Amino acid sequence: MKKLFLLLLPMILVCNFNKTKNQEVKNSGYMEGKAQISDEITTFFFIRHAEKDRKNSEEKDPALTDIGIKRAEKWAEIFKEVQFDLIYSSDFKRTRETAQKIAESRNLEIQLYDSGKLNDEEFQKKTKGKTVLVIGHSNTNPKFVNSILGEEKYSDIADEESGSLFILSVSPVGVKSSQVLYIN
């Protein structure tokens, strides 16, 4: 857990530093009479839902297993220093249960997204300049990330992989960066 936090710490600090510096510039009056910086950096964290119950292959919307519940709690611990503005989840038990642990620790409401409308205009408008967590699936997370990046960089995640974390930053001028980590 400490190793993971050390890996994430630079990204967390950059996200929070950029928000603080942008606000300081806006509040300083420096930009008065000049073109204003329109928005801050947008940072996205994408995780896949925790381990789902696979006992019944007919079940289309399974809940988390005991191991999955522990992973959801681990995600909440990993993200305890990240100041999320919004938390999104697809409308499945396993994603909502994974999101719930994190949302409860921040008193945030889980927003549901439609996997058929990834990165649409409404989503872009709501998330601009924010720090956003998205809980999705082995196929939707890479598609969502690729849509934001505007390129086909990532392919679907292996079905048995529940510890993937994509981190993206989008600047107001359109510069985009991404990385993917795998957490045990």
Image (tube, rainbow, N blue to C red):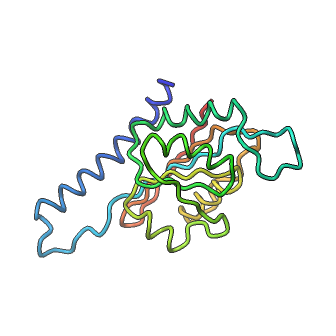
Q: Residue 168, can we see it?
A: no
Near-viewer residue (49 or 104):
104
Left or right for 96, reference 176: right
Labels in figure, total: 0
Is residue 162 positioned above or below 136 on the image?
Answer: above
Residue at 72% from the left image edge and 43% from the top image edge: 63
Is residue 131 positioned above or below 67 on the image?
Answer: below
- For residue 67, which quarter of the picture? top right
Query: x, y (%) of residue 22?
Result: 25, 57
Near-viewer residue (62 or 8):
62
Near-viewer residue (93 or 7):
93
Query: x, y (%) of residue 24?
Result: 18, 55
Residue at 57% from the left image edge and 43% from the top image edge: 165
Residue at 45% from the left image edge and 40% from the top image edge: 105
Near-viewer residue (41 or 100):
100
Residue at 39% from the left image edge and 57% from the top image edge: 130
- For residue 98, which quarter of the picture? top right
Query: x, y (%) of residue 2?
Result: 47, 24
Q: Residue 88, can we see it?
A: yes
Query: x, y (%) of residue 184?
Result: 63, 29
Left or right for 59, reference 95: right
Left or right for 25, reference 145: left
